[in-house]
Amino acid sequence: MYILSVVIEYGKTEQEKAILIGRAPDSRLRGEVEASLDELARLSQTAGAQVIDKRIQTRPRPDSSFYIGRGLVDELKIRLKENGANCVIFDDTLTPAQQRNLEAELDAKVIDRPILILDIFANQARTRAARLQVELAQLEYTLPRLTGAWVHFSRQYGRIGSKGPGETQLEIDRRRVRTRISNLKGLLKKLDRQRSTQRKQRQKMFKVAMVGYTNAGKSTLFNLLTRGEVTTADRLFTTLDSTTRQMVSPHPVQVVISDTVGFIKKLPHQLVESFKSTLEEVSLADLLVQVVDCSAPDYRQRFDQVREVLADIGADKVPYLLVFNKIDANPEFVPPPSGQTVSFVVSAAEKTGIAALQTELIARSQKRMMRFTGQH
Ligand SMILES: Nc1nc2c(ncn2[C@@H]2O[C@H](COP(=O)(O)OP(=O)(O)OP(=O)(O)O)[C@@H](O)[C@H]2O)c(=O)[nH]1
Ligand SMILES: [Mg+2]
């Protein structure tokens, strides 16, 4: 069941019909905002909503009451009615007041980018750790907003409250949310201890972590390098946990590779925070393989956004190499000069360019091993 579906009588679900809204601080930035709205559309579809329209408003600053201007609010009311739409999704973070005012004025569900991403994570989390981490992030995001008439977390509420699914956020008592937050933190701490025992066993190995924007092909490449069986799919946030496996190699090397959750623009801070232990596979790595989808027109911005999240988790100083993936989908691509950083151009789907990458990983692990044995 998608969280974005409205639960209606008799337990049937009705698909959200959504209008997407972006804001360009000035008209020169409209192109960038359009690309961002395309991504928001993809996120919305992943969450189960049907996108029926997109609007970009140019204004230097968001309106403090409605985020958008009064004129667009009135226009939206009409557009929603005309199209039988019941949901408006904003490509930004709304303040609790903006969210409340818009919902009252539009008589529709109002969702912002962090909520959408949190919903997708909640929907796709499969492992226990991922589920607990998402729930924690959702509650941390919700807590300061408990005054709004929100209904998105009905599934979560069902778990927290006593009335079962479908009760609204207004009915939830802050105290119970706080209690649940502290329970979740306790449960996650226990899982952390297990993880750190496993990490200790890998201490002497050369640790490589795949990082990159969501859907860049990290898991596909990971499976190739390790003969792993991590699920891959053409959708956002397929991987929400870390998997570590030994690299396949003709030489006797001890290289372990971790595949982990992908990043995205404006990744909610609460998610980064609660996924910190999953992401320790990244911050404690000896080397990062930063996978870049070179068929994405905005691959440079995505690269920058990944670097930002890496800084946020304290992994921006870890040495990294660049892997431009999906060259089959953009054969004209020429990698930009990357200074000291070694880069590779590959197609994980067609298994081209992989041997050179493997050789580099082996060479780096051997170099480290020599340093290690030289010191002791
Ligand atoms: N054309 C092309 N598609 C690829 C290539 N590598 C991966 N893909 C496809 O891209 C999609 C995403 O691949 P994944 O390996 O799941 O990507 P990921 O980076 O792990 O994504 P998340 O776990 O969702 O963050 C899948 O449909 C893959 O088949 C490639 O080299 N070329
Ligand atoms: Mg993946």
Image (tube, helix red, strand yellow):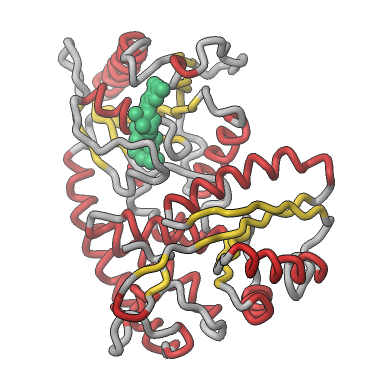
**Residue displayed at 38% across by 85% down:** 167
Image spot of residue 155 (x, y percent): 34, 73
Task: Residue 168: name its quadrant.
Answer: bottom left
**Residue displayed at 56% across by 58% down:** 113
Ligand 2 found in image quarter: top left
Q: Is residue 3 left or right of residue 129?
A: right
Along the viewing direction, whichever of 171 and 274 lies nearer the viewer? 171
Image spot of residue 211 (x, y percent): 42, 35
Image spot of residue 256 (x, y percent): 24, 30
Q: Is residue 364 above or below residue 200?
A: above
Along the viewing direction, whichever of 255 and 116 lies nearer the viewer? 116
**Residue displayed at 35% across by 81% down:** 9
Can residue 209 be seen in this snapshot?
no
- Report the number of numbered marks: 0
Image spot of residue 30 (x, y percent): 76, 43
Q: Is residue 223 above or below residue 356?
A: below
Task: Residue 200: name its quadrant.
Answer: top left
Along the viewing direction, whichever of 23 and 360 lies nearer the viewer? 23
Task: Residue 18: name its quadrant.
Answer: bottom right
Quadrant in which the N terminus appears: bottom left
Q: Is residue 144 left or right of residue 189?
A: right
